[in-house]
Amino acid sequence: MMKARVLYIDDEVDLLELAASFFEEENLPIETCSDFNQALNLIRNNHFDVIISDAKMPTGSGHELFALIKKENLFHGKSILVTGHLEESEQEVNYDLIIYKPIQFQDLIDTVKRMLEI
């Protein structure tokens, strides 16, 4: 059986490194990236079961990313938007879950495990 794959996108590299260490401790494979276009490229060329994206990034928003990958039919897994506060425009896309900052990584991992049913 293939292991579930998680992609975490955030422009705060320190946060990604911390998230990766938490996920790896739980034996959950995670890939991270800090750039909108890099994320899009990864999604186009790989299979992910869960995508976690920060709402606000300098190169493009999580909202735009989820709207684009759904429109292009690139992703059929679970989507989590991480935000400080929800903008009106962000409510248009149906995410599986919206998590508000500050993030508790153990809660995030537990949520991902529930989504993956592991």
Image (spheres, rainbow, N blue to C red):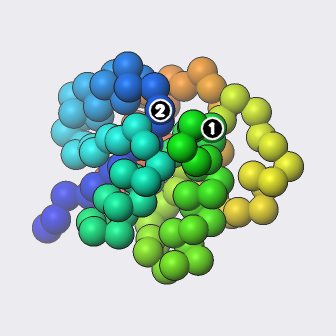
> Viewer-proximal residue, 32 or 106?
32
- Is 77 left or right of 58, judged from the image as shown? left
Q: Which residue shows up at 28% across the image and 55% down it? A: 5
Measured as percent of width and height from the top left, residue 114 is found at 44, 50
Residue farthest along the right direction in this orientation: 88
Residue 9 numbered mark, or none: none
Q: Is residue 1 visible?
A: yes
Residue 56 numbered mark, or none: 1
- Residue that mark 2 sits on: 11
Q: Amino acid at mark 1?
A: Lys
Measured as percent of width and height from the top left, residue 20 is found at 29, 31
- Is 25 left or right of 52, judged from the image as shown? left
Report how far apart the C-alphas of labels 1 and 2 lie in the structure: 8 Å
Give the answer, above or below, for where 54 lies relative to 114.
Answer: above
Q: Amino acid at mark 2?
A: Asp
Q: Which residue shows up at 63% across the image and 57% down it? A: 64
Marks 1/2 in contact by CB < 8 Å: the verdict is: yes
Q: Secondary structure at mark 1?
A: loop
Q: Which residue shows up at 51% across the image and 23% down it? A: 104
Quarter of the N terminus within the rendering? bottom left
Q: Which residue shows up at 21% across the image and 28% down it? A: 25
